[in-house]
Amino acid sequence: MKNIKKIIGIIGNEEDRNIVTNILLNKGYYKISIIDKVKEIAKLLKLEDNLDLVRERGYKVGRLYWINLLLPSVPNDKNLILIDDLRLEDIVEKIMKVYYVSNKNIVMPDTVEKIERPENIDDFKKIVEKILTH
């Protein structure tokens, strides 16, 4: 896996994921998105209106299908990686740390760490910085 030191995956709603993503990008993380690769493959297959179908077909090929397609695209000088659009199917505990960002109480696997999202956006940013950039 090249010289990658750390992979962080984020699960949650788009607004919360964007806040976390911006903090990590400012800390030097390199972002890769599964949905971008799904869209690329969907376009080749002329299935742009069926992104979920394309993503599911990738999982049928193998659990790590999308991750394996993305990691080779990471530049050699990038060793802190962020995947900002994980689904539970994408989680690979051995190679990544996954965070679920939400104020909802949804059951997640034990390997997924929850970041509680307070109402105040500034408080949320402080919590995220403390947890993810230590």
Image (cartoon, rainbow, N blue to C red):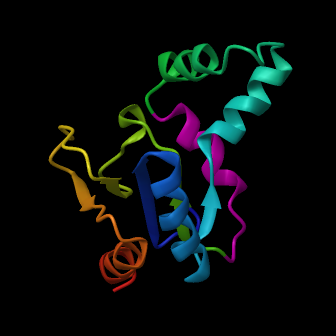
Apparent side of residue 21 relative to residue 124 in the rendered image (left or right): right
Instruction: Report whether residue 79 is seen.
Output: no
Image quadrant where residue 26 sits? bottom right
Q: Position of residue 48 (x, y in %)?
A: 78, 19
Expressed as whole percent of the image width and height from the top left, the position of residue 50 reads: 68, 14
Residue at position x 36%, y 82% from top?
Answer: 126
Q: Viewed as shown, does residue 115 lie left or right of 87?
A: left
Q: Is residue 69 magenta?
A: yes
Specify the quadrant that holds the C terminus.
bottom left
Is residue 25 visible to us here? yes
Q: Is residue 85 above or below residue 134?
A: above
Residue 118 placement, left or right of 69? left
Q: Position of residue 2 (x, y in %)?
A: 59, 65
Q: For this rendering, which residue is in front, 25 or 15?
A: 15
Please state which of residues 18 and 26 is positioned toward the viewer in this rendering.
18
Please check the rendered image and state whether residue 93 is part of the magenta-colored stretch, yes or no: no
Q: Magenta span covers which residues?
A: 64-77
Q: How many badges with numbers are in the image?
A: 0
Quarter of image, res 3: bottom right
Q: Is residue 25 above or below residue 19?
A: below
Magenta stretch secondary structure, dominant? helix
* Residue furthest bottom as drawn: 134
**Can you give x and y, in whole percent of width and height, for residue 81 in the image?**
54, 65
Give me the residue at 64% from left, 40% from top: 69
